[in-house]
Image (cartoon, rainbow, N blue to C red):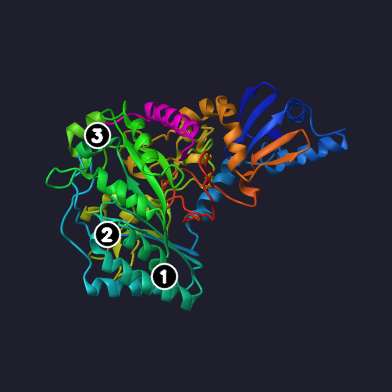
Amino acid sequence: MKASRYNFFAQKSDGKIAFNAFSAALGLFSEQTCNLYERVVSTGDKNLSEREKVVLEELVKAHFIVPKDFDELKALQVRMNRRRYDSSLLGLTIMPTAACNLRCRYCYEKTSEKKMSPETIDALVGFVKDSISTAKRFDVTWYGGEPLLEKKTIYDLSSRFLEACQELNCYYSAGIITNGVLLDGETARRLATECSINFCQVTLDGPRSVHNARRPFKDGSGTYDAILKNLQEASRYLRINIRINIDSENEVNYLELLDDLELYNLKDKADIHIGMVEPVGFARVCADTTSKCLDDEKMAEYQRHFYSTATQRGFSAQFYLVPANVFGLCAAEIDNSFVVEPDGSLHKCWVTVGDEKERVGNIRTGVPQSTQLLKWVSFDPTIYEECRECRVLPLCFGNCVYRAQESVDGLHCGMWKYKLEKVLESIEEFQGPLEKYIDEVRSVGTDIRWVYEGVNSRKRCCTIVCVRCTSLGGVECTFGQCKPLKVGGKK
């Protein structure tokens, strides 16, 4: 037996916090368990008591200890390929329109007035029917532009998707990414009851003055109050996820938003997470936007601070104490996952939308083998020594393919590389909220207190909203039946 190369430990008063990046198992180990672990790794598993055998079985199941001849890197490659070429899943990010009613400072998209025609809608339904004829699951994320500018298209397509899935015995789930301006109560009700949309992501970039400066209407007027009012109504029907985009412009005052969320009674009704403004797509050509972007290391520290503060205030922050998505692939790398433009063109990544050179196919003619397609579905970070030796490889597997392709050395490390050990070191301050709101906790005598048992658990968790799948970290995410691991707020 040997120790997994992907183990992480943090000392605590009566043992250690233990996390394995391969399985995503998280546990509180007693001193006796730590001693057993060290003994088995150094001298083997002979002469163990019955109690020690039980504990060792738990450690093996959670991947903290593996057989001596087990090649973890090859196992990760197998996992990657299984996920990448799983034909039982179809994931589509659908843009009913490329138009938008806001003018956000840092937007990476080239907006246009394009919207889906009736002919394109029919063609998309045909594409979906063909694609799910052998699939077991179909996941949709409505996206834009601003998708709610074309509500009728969403209602129409959703109805036809649901009918097709019922006929073909295929599971259907859906979510929406919207700026929230048009998400009134009646719209939210119809999205939930008629379209089977159960969650939405809306961006608020700080308190009123900051948000309105960064995400105004096209005429420059503010959107903040309208969005908060809508979220208050929409939360009756949809699970709300609020994203806060952080750069150097709002890094000092984004926490003030929590006051207003509490005022609008959204404290227990919305999950919150922070994302970073990145120099990608159309935003890349804007020197002003690029100069304000934070690096991953600094952003990792902001995330840790934000989730600590939000949790202590009782918010349902999507704070994943440790990343629990162990599938390690972005949707752009999944063979059967696409972004659909309003004209029916297909892309692998929503950052490339509008760039004709990056198209990989069309809903009418299919997806041929091409250089553009292969660069996404053949991306393999294990060709780089730095990735092969990295202990967080199972969590990111090369992270963003788009950013990696643009970098000089072909790599783009994710934030867990910079924050995982710090998070584990400070995890005790969240132990109370964690055990109160997570029903994964299970004790093995006094030796191990599992918070999350990893890939062998009855439930699976996914990382923070939608960097790993085309849905938004919903009750069941696109490429792995999972529930978000949250701290704070109500379940």
Q: For mark 1, does the 10 Å Cα neighbourhood hold few (<14), some (14 to 19), or many (20 or more) residues?
A: some
- Tell whether 168 sits left or right of 103: right
Majority SS type along the magenta span? helix
Which label number is shown at residue 131?
1
Q: For mark 2, does the 10 Å Cα neighbourhood hold few (<14), some (14 to 19), or many (20 or more) residues?
A: many
Q: Residue at x 22, y 65 (%)?
A: 343
* Local secondary structure at mark 3: helix
Q: Estimate the x, y position of residue 140 in percent, counting from the top left.
A: 39, 61
Q: Front-most of 491 and 352?
A: 491
Per the rendered image, the range of residues in magenta is 293-316
Quadrant of the image occupied by residue 430:
top right
Tell me if residue 270 comes above or below residue 153 in the rendering: above
Quadrant placement of the N terminus: top right
Which residue of the protein is positioned furthest toward the bottom in this rendering? Answer: 167
Choose the circle earlier in sequence order: 3 or 1.
1
Q: CA distance from mark 2 to mark 3?
A: 24 Å
Q: CA distance from mark 1 to mark 2?
A: 26 Å
**Which residue is tagged 2?**
148
**Which residue is tagged 3?**
210
Q: CA distance from mark 3 to mark 1?
A: 44 Å
Q: Estimate the x, y position of residue 262 in percent, counting from the top left.
A: 40, 39
Residues at badges 2 and 3 in contact (C-beta under 8 Å)? no
Question: Magenta segment: does it hold 112?
Answer: no
Q: Estimate the x, y position of residue 297 in percent, counting from the top left.
A: 40, 27
